[in-house]
Image (cartoon, helix red, strand yellow):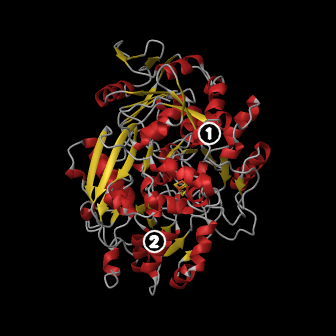
Amino acid sequence: MDKFTELTAIAAPMPTENIDTDQIIPARFLKTIQRTGLGKNAFAAQRYDADGNEKPDFVLNQEPFRHAEILITYDNLGCGSSREHAPWALLDFGIRCVIAPSFADIFFNNCFKNGILPIPLPREICDELMDDARQGSNSRLTVDLERQVIVRPNGETIAFEVDPFRRHMLLEGLDDIGQTMAHDTEISSFEHRPSRAWVPSITIGTVK
Amino acid sequence: MPVTNSPRTLFDKIWDDHVVERLEDGTCILYIDRHLVHEVTSPQAFEGLRMSGRRVRRPDATVAVVDHNVPTSDRSKPIEEPQSRLQIETLEKNVAQFGIPYFPLRSASQGIVHVVGPEQGISLPGMTIVCGDSHTSTHGALGSLAFGIGTSEVEHVLATQTILQKPAKNMRVSVEGKVGPGVTAKDIMLAIIGRIGTAGGTGHVIEFAGSAIRDLDMAGRMTLCNMSIEAGARAGLVAPDETTFAYVKGRPFAPKGGAFDQACDYWRSLVSDEGAYFDTEVTLAAEEIIPSVTWGTSPQDVLPIDGSVPSPSDVADPARAAQIQRALDYMGLEAGQKIAGTPVDVVFIGSCTNSRLEDLRAAADVVRGRHVAKGVRAMIVPGSGLVKHAAEAEGLDKVFLDAGFEWREAGCSMCLGMNPDRLTPGQRCASTSNRNFEGRQGPDGRTHLCSPAMAAAAAVTGRLCDVRELVKETV
Ligand code: SF4
């Protein structure tokens, strides 16, 4: 996973609530066995017409937003399916940071696992940042994870909260499997608790 | 494992019993009893294991099944779509390499992972259960803590049999009283989502309680917990009781003999203590719930069947008004129109929400002696091979086939349209699935969520209608 430290980039405004993961990446594109290559189909239904031509009124088809690395939306971003293909599609498109008043739990989690920083901020602030974003190509936001601030084009800073453990993992680009494996002894001793004796094993092999 | 004397919720108890270790910032290493794996969200996880030379820690706590991609037509033929075939073959290669128990496509027990788990006794009360699928919440009906995870977490669980999480908040939704005739678990759940909204449960685990919930059979409880995710919750739970134990007993992978009794003793302790703290409490009166459908493109867009579609002018918030307008345009509906009477093109009875034997019986009760309306395509997709078989043993297949329904093989099918079962643009569908998002059942398809009985009523009348009017004579 790539580290996330500081990002200065174009932000795309999508003033919509409940953007679900089916919108971010429709099911028919989930047949891949890889993590990459989904960016071209991110938001496919809104981005392309039936013949595969770009719809000019969709924000990510417009300059400068087709180069956006930050996405700003309204409440409950990423609701619906647990598909990690949603953050993979965003990442493959180039998005490294998503800002919204609230997020769906699984999507929020999945973002961190892929080096995307999700930032919850009040709706009024999202509106202000969207206004900044709409000012065109010279208008960039800086997201500084080290200092936990967003710097607006006018120099004003907005502080944000992030879970310390997740911040650390992002800053260092760490894989949490390795970290958990270091607790192998505790996991093994948990598995041997007598109170767990009733938990059946499922026999190896194909089940009928 | 901090066991305190203060009253605890059902969620707290299951959580506490699975904490391996609490890290400094409060994140817990939580042990996972069952990991269910399917073909769509696992390939990248297995690939990750291979790249880092890791093994699957507990193949004997892991079960794989194919469901999302599989055709629901004749299975003697090879799978036509090359990408679907590749995903299924990849799963088969992975389960073979890592020694994971697997229900292949041709197994008589293959089906939707959330139907197969409980049906086989793989999912049991008191367990922690995960799957790379948001509707894992279904298994919470057994009184287990079950939630969906992303593919990175699938890899984490494969490698460590644990996940990293902080405890959720507790919410209790109580439905008190008795529901009227024709009102099902699906209507109860739609009413709950309509009340709290699709983000109402965010950060929470919902415990469903109250006499109307106690009265539900296991299939109904699964329908309820299944759609917890549509209310934004991490998981849904129903405290295990005698209904649960009777359901579990004798299932292929359930504990047997003395182990079953030991398990039951433990399971009986899994109830929220008197005075346990819930961050959020919601109460609904069962009598007020009537058969419901969704009108829009979010599961919270719920209407009782006698209701009218909202208008953008009903709301003050301009963003919300724009969203209503957009949903109306997408769904091809007029503001203020009655939802009953809306003609449908397709009826889909299936999905992990409503594809169990009890669901098919409820639909058959409406269909018996009637015929699918002209111009309507109606399909039944049983949740598993065993459900299909049991339904056939009761003659339900004949009821449906005689009425002009398609009777198909088990799988996710038109719930998400990854296989060839898809809506074409503009088609309107009464569906027993769980999501009415734009394009969910096929690009530009229009979905109205409802119960199996309501879907069956739509099939035979060709319109969204109140099932209670069709079965008046019998109820
Ligand atoms: S039936 Fe639908 S919701 Fe359920 S697991 Fe399959 S695709 Fe997901």
Earlier along the polypeptide chain: callout 1 or callout 2? 1
Q: Residue furthest bottom?
A: B369
Estimate how packed mark 1 is, as few (under 14), some (14 to 19) or many (20 or more) residues with alpha carbons within 10 Å.
Answer: many
Residue at x-position 58% and y-position 61%: B119
Compare residues B241 and A116 and report the one nearer the observer: B241
Three-letter amino acid code at the position of disc 1: Val
Answer with left or right where residue B63 lies relative to residue B247: right
Estimate how packed mark 2 is, as few (under 14), some (14 to 19) or many (20 or more) residues with alpha carbons within 10 Å.
Answer: many
**In the picture shown, does residue B273 fall above or below B77?**
above
Say how many tags the image has: 2
Q: How far apart are labels 1 and 2 at the CA level?
A: 38 Å
Residue at x-position 28% and y-position 63%: B289
Residue A41: which numbered mark, if any?
Answer: none
The image quadrant that residue A197 belongs to is top right
Q: Position of residue B272 (x, y in %)?
A: 37, 44
Three-letter amino acid code at the position of disc 2: Asp
Residue that mark 1 sits on: B154
**In the picture shown, does residue B204 fall above or below A137?**
below
Determine if residue B452 is in view: yes
Label 1 or label 2, whichever lies nearer to me, is 1
Residue at x-position 31% and y-position 28%: A122
The image quadrant that residue A185 belongs to is top right
Q: Position of residue A195 (x, y in %)?
A: 57, 40
Determine if residue B124 is in view: no
Residue B345: which numbered mark, if any?
Answer: 2
Q: Which chain carries label 1?
A: B
Contact (Cβ within 8 Å) of mark 1 with mark 2 = no
Q: Where is residue A41 in the image (x, y as percent from the top left)?
A: 57, 43
